[in-house]
Image: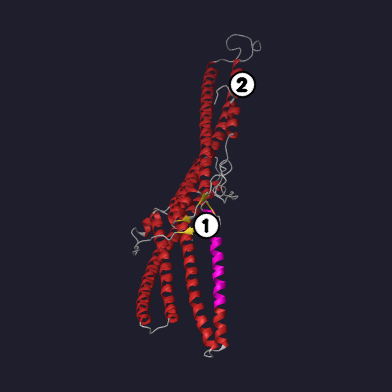
Amino acid sequence: MKKELSISLAALLILGNVVPVASAQEITPSKVNVVAQNDGAVNTGNRFFNKVHIEELTLEEAIRYGMEHNYQLKELEINLDMLKINERILLENMDDMEDALDYLTLQRDKLKRQLRDLEDMKDITPPSGEDGTETGETPDPTNQIEEQIEFIRKQIYQLEDQESTSESAKSQLQNQLDTVDLNKTSLANNQEMLLKSMEVSISSIFLNLIMIEDQINFMKDTLETQKQQVEATKIKFQLGLVSRKDFDKATREITELESKIAQLENQLKTEKANFAASIGVTYTGDYTLVKPELGNLVLVTQQKSTEELIKNSYNMENARNTISVKEKVLERIEDDEDASYREVELAELEVEIAKLQLESLEIQLESAINKAYLQLKQQYQALQDAEEKLKNAQVDNGDLQIYFDLGLLSKNDFDAANISVKQAELNYNSAKYQYYLLTKQAELMEKGVISTN
């Protein structure tokens, strides 16, 4: 701040440069409307991301594409950049404010020294006439000194008033800086949570699409078997061995199954298109999903204590930071001599609310952790049961294979029995995929990402 500026102008300029900081609600990322790009078009000037053309898609590629083409992550990054700019502006304003305060203090101290000098002069200066001169011939020097003293006192009072105003503005700037710092930390934590949880969310959608495909394939196998049985029923009907009612019922079941398959295929097509759009992949009609190799899945147990998981979670870090900022605001208000009782009371309540929210969050996180590990245990048992049923179905089918090879079982009956094995395989794969996702959620909790939904 240039010293040649007047004191009041310096304070006015500083107060006028306070930059408002967006609240936490205002900087919460929102969805970005995206206009689909034409196939083959490259328009880097108008898009943040260019879409990828694929023929087939693995789980690993889906996760990579999703992380590289995520608008919410990009928006979080931009919001962080905006907060950093706001922070720099506030820091510059804080420096200017401190310069102005230093200048005000310097001028006030200078005036106080002048005041002391004048008061000393007043004490040693005799009134007019006491030095031998006639009263009225010259102005009374004592009166002149008193006028100067009164003038300087008024200037000191004005400077002190400006200092008080500037100190209040400095406190507001510091509150805003603390809020920016809190928002920066919260956004950075949210960015990390989103980044780390994307693998689970993308895997969940990908495996759900795989399960829909498996369901469609199973239903198609069932349809072929039922068609063979209907042909056999038709022959029996023609021979008078079954009623028309039984034949019509078997035919209706074929029609119903075909309708369900068509509906499920339409659903799969729509969901694959939506999934492609969400991870930045161009959907040109269809693409092949490559089934992932999940390896040997073992029972996952809790390695860290619930207290440690809660303490190290991003949610708790955000809550603790909020309390810290609220307490700093309260401390500054308590130190402000001009602050009213109501202002202190409101700041105290803000701290109480933040502490209450942290305590509530602890309970929510504890419940989420307990529920997650219970689901893991239950799903692992479901996986074990599904595997056992699959083995039993395969053993039974092996026995039926012998009967079929010996001519003791018709092909229709053998094919119908094979459906039980395929159903067991479908159930086992579904249980395996669900358990795999739960293990990934457990890994997330170890990394500090705990979902309370």
Specify the label residue 147 is tagged with: 2
Residue 150 versus residue 9: which sits nearer the camera? 9
| Residue 261 forms part of the magenta stretch | yes
Q: Is residue 376 above or below residue 320?
A: below
Image quarter of residue 243: bottom right
Image quarter of residue 374: bottom left
Residue placed at 53% from the left, 16% from the top? Answer: 124
The disc labelled 2 sits on which kind of residue? Glu
* Residue furthest top in the image: 132
The x, y position of residue 105, in whole percent, is 51, 27
Q: Disc 2 and disc 1: Cα gap in Å?
A: 83 Å
| Residue 257 forms part of the magenta stretch | yes
The disc labelled 1 sits on which kind of residue? Phe
* Residue furthest bottom in the image: 240
The x, y position of residue 401, in whole percent, is 37, 78
Q: Which residue is mark 1?
A: 275
Q: Which residues are magenta?
A: 254-278
On screen, residue 153 versus residue 55, left or right, reads right
Asked if residue 106 can be seen in this view, the reply is yes
On screen, residue 351 versus residue 154, left or right, reads left
Q: Is residue 125 above or below residue 453?
A: above
Magenta span: chief secondary structure: helix
Q: Quadrant of the N terminus?
A: top right
The x, y position of residue 276, in whole percent, is 52, 55
Label 2 SS: helix
On screen, residue 168 versus residue 306, left or right, reads right
Asked if residue 369 can be seen in this view, the reply is no
Specify the label residue 395 is tagged with: none
Residue placed at 54% from the left, 44% from the top? Answer: 48
The x, y position of residue 63, in whole percent, is 45, 53
Label 1 SS: helix
Residue 255 versus residue 375: which sits nearer the camera? 255
